[in-house]
Structures are given as C-alpha cells and as structure tokens.
Image (cartoon, helix red, strand yellow):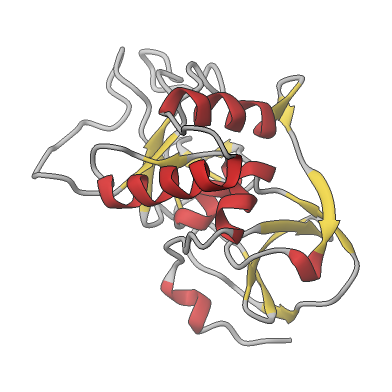
C-alpha cells in the first residue's frame, strides 16, 4: 500500500501509487507509525532529485524529515516548492538569479522562502489567484472543472500521480492559478521546469 507522501499540484499530501520524478521535503510531517500529522513544519519547501551521491534513506524514518514525491518539477512548483541548493545547485542558481532580476532586490533562500510561504498558504489552506490563461507561462498549473492542469505550449495537460493523462487546447479567459504567484513570475522570467515525459505523449481532446 502506498504511503501518504505523494504531493498533488494543490499541495495536498496523499496516498497514491505513482511516485513521480522528484522528491522534496517540508520538515518532519509524520509520526513513529509513518502517519502524516501535519502538512508542513518549516517554511523551506524544497524539491530534490531522486538520487544524489549514492545516498540511501529509509522512507519516513521516525524523527527524520518526511520524503515527499512529485510527478515532476512543475507539479512541485505548483505545490509551493523550489529547487534544492545542494542536490540541484545549477537549477537553484538559475532560480535565485531570476528571482533577483524579477524582484529587484538581492535574493536569498530566506527571502524566497518567506515570499513563497506568503503566496502558497492562506489561513492554513492553499492560496490561489485568478489570471488570464493566455498570459500564463509554460509550467504553471491551473484548476479547471475540479482538475489540475499543466499549462504547456498551446495546451492544458491533466495531472495524475503517474503521468499526464489527457489534453485540451488552451483557451482564453480567467482561470484559478495553483502555482504561487512568485513562482509563476520566475517561470515567466525564463525558468523551464522539468516536466514528465508523458507531456509529449498526451492525446488531445
């Protein structure tokens, strides 16, 4: 049975079979029985590679950070995470450089994490906002008809825990944006997130 450590684009931590292509953490979220007891412990929400320097971990070890899994980097961004400075140094450097250019102020991990926290959580719930779909950059996520969709080229791709399942043409009009506003700004500034290969295989309807 799957552990409750998979993260949706809504930022929810669920128990589903698909592990995805990225790992991350928000601190210690589980108890000794590997049950989730909180949705986050720290403001530093990061997204990591699955393998790094041969390190091995027992998933959800008591009193150690909770390993969380995402379909891909775009889904991790939607949930409110950003690149890890250790295992993804090049991506982190690009992200923090674009952040500094966008914000007009020196970028630090603490400053980014504080802004991300403000943009992703409101009253302990997922914070979203509305914007024009045509303006959103590739890699952003939106909510339509109760489903999370990835904005990708001229299309929207439906998220699932293991792959993108179907597509639809990108239309016009206002939509609910799931990806935090500041992360959308970094995508628009030129950051290209890693996206699951199924994004190029989805049949459009």
Compared with residue 17, is residue 164 higher up or lower down, i.e. above or below?
below
- Does residue 178 appear left or right of residue 138 in this picture? right
Residue lying farthest to the left in this orientation: 54
Q: Is residue 1 visible?
A: no
**Residue nearest the observer in this picture, 122 or 38:** 122
Compared with residue 46, is residue 30 higher up or lower down, i.e. above or below?
above
Which residue is rendered at x = 60% and y = 68% of the image?
138
Which residue is rendered at x = 76% and y = 77% of the image?
170
Residue 183 in the image, given as x and y percentages of width and height: 59, 46
- Does residue 152 appear left or right of residue 33 in this picture? right
Q: Quadrant of the C terminus?
A: bottom right
Compared with residue 162, is residue 118 higher up or lower down, i.e. above or below?
above
Which residue is rendered at x = 52% and y = 56% of the image?
74
Compared with residue 119, is residue 21 higher up or lower down, i.e. above or below?
below
Where is residue 21, by image quadrant?
Answer: bottom left
- Does residue 116 appear left or right of residue 4 in this picture? right
């Amino acid at each position: 049975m799957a552990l409750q450590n998979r993260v949706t684009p809504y930022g929810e931590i669920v128990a589903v079979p698909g592990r995805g292509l990225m790992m991350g953490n928000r601190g210690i979220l589980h108890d000794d029985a590997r049950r989730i007891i909180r949705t986050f412990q720290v403001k530093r929400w990061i997204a990591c590679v699955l393998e790094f320097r041969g390190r091995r971990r027992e998933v959800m070890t008591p009193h150690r950070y909770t390993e969380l899994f995402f379909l891909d980097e775009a889904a991790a961004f939607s949930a409110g995470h950003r690149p890890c400075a250790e295992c993804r140094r090049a991506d982190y450097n690009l992200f923090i450089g674009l952040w500094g250019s966008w914000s007009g102020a020196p970028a630090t991990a603490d400053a980014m994490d504080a802004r991300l926290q403000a943009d992703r959580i409101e009253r302990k719930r997922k914070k979203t906002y509305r914007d024009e779909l045509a303006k959103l950059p590739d890699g952003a996520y939106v909510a339509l008809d109760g489903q999370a969709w990835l904005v990708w080229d001229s299309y929207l791709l439906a998220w699932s825990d293991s792959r993108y399942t179907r597509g639809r043409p990108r239309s016009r009009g206002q939509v609910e944006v799931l990806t935090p506003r500041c992360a959308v700004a970094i995508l628009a500034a030129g950051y290209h997130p890693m996206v699951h290969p199924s994004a190029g295989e989805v049949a459009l309807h």
